[in-house]
Amino acid sequence: MSVLKKILAIFITAIDLFAVVVLDFPSVLNGTPLDRAAFTAEPVWADEFDGTELDTTKWKDHHTSKEAGLNVTTIRRGGYWNPQMAQVADGNLTIRTEYLEEGLGGGPAGYYTCGLDTNGLFEKAHGYFEIRCKLPKGQGHWAAFWMLNDGMSNVDGSGRDGAEIDIFESPYYYFRK
């Protein structure tokens, strides 16, 4: 960016800040009005991962259809995804990523992991979302927590195309000892 563009950007930002802070200039919202009645003070969904199995009334494997069953391996970006890589124990969900010589669920040798979602099981248009998690150690992992809208697969240019909102995304996080 040129020096002139930087100076102009700083100048415009300063004017905006001055108008909001000193002059109490209101911000004008554009778009669909927000229905504040949709917000509640109480949690409407949570999973504390009690028990020894994933609660399939709350979660499903992101890359396997419901009809395919729970032991199907799918290929995704050079790796293999299998719902058996998600395990529940001691109040935690652990999603493993491992190189398996013998494969899993009929799949070949390679790196295996799992992705989970709540699509069709729980959906919310507005709210506050949080997660407690530990990121995996090692290179090449892409840990993420996203919100996806119901039009995620729609790509027709209508303006209602799908989108993801990243709560956090950690591509290629490398933890040094």
Image: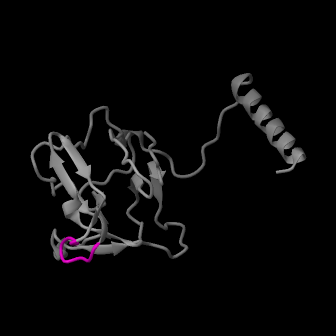
Name the side, left or right, on which 87 lies relative to 6. Answer: left
Between residues 47 and 82, which one lies in front from this camera angle?
82
Q: Main secondary structure of the magenta part?
A: loop
Query: Is residue 41 rendered to the left or right of residue 33?
Result: left
The quadrant of the image that shows the C terminus is top left
The part of the image, by quadrant, that contains residue 108 is: bottom left
Residue 103 lies in magenta, yes or no? yes
* Residue 27 coordinates in the image, percent (x, y): 65, 37
Nearer-the-camera pick, 16 or 8: 8
Residue 104 lies in what quarter of the image?
Answer: bottom left
Q: Is residue 30 magenta?
A: no
Quick check: 38 above or below 97? above
Q: Residue at x 47, y 45 (%)?
A: 34
> Residue lying furthest right in this view?
4
The residue drawn where x is 24% and y is 43% is: 45
Instruction: Using residue 36 as the reference point, say whether residue 81 is left or right of it.
Output: left
Q: How is the image coloured?
A: one colour
Residue 33 percent across, percent down from the top left: 50, 47
Of residues 46 and 80, the one nearer the viewer is 80
Residue at image position (15%, 53%) is 55
Task: Tell me the magenta residue range.
Answer: 102-109
> Residue 35: x and y, percent?
42, 44
Number of marks in the rendered image:
0
Residue 114 in which image quadrant: bottom left
Q: Measured from the top left, where is residue 129 in percent x and y?
A: 37, 42
The answer to whether residue 155 is above or below residue 32 is below
Question: Relative to the observer, which residue lies in front, 115 or 13?
Answer: 115
Outermost left residue: 51
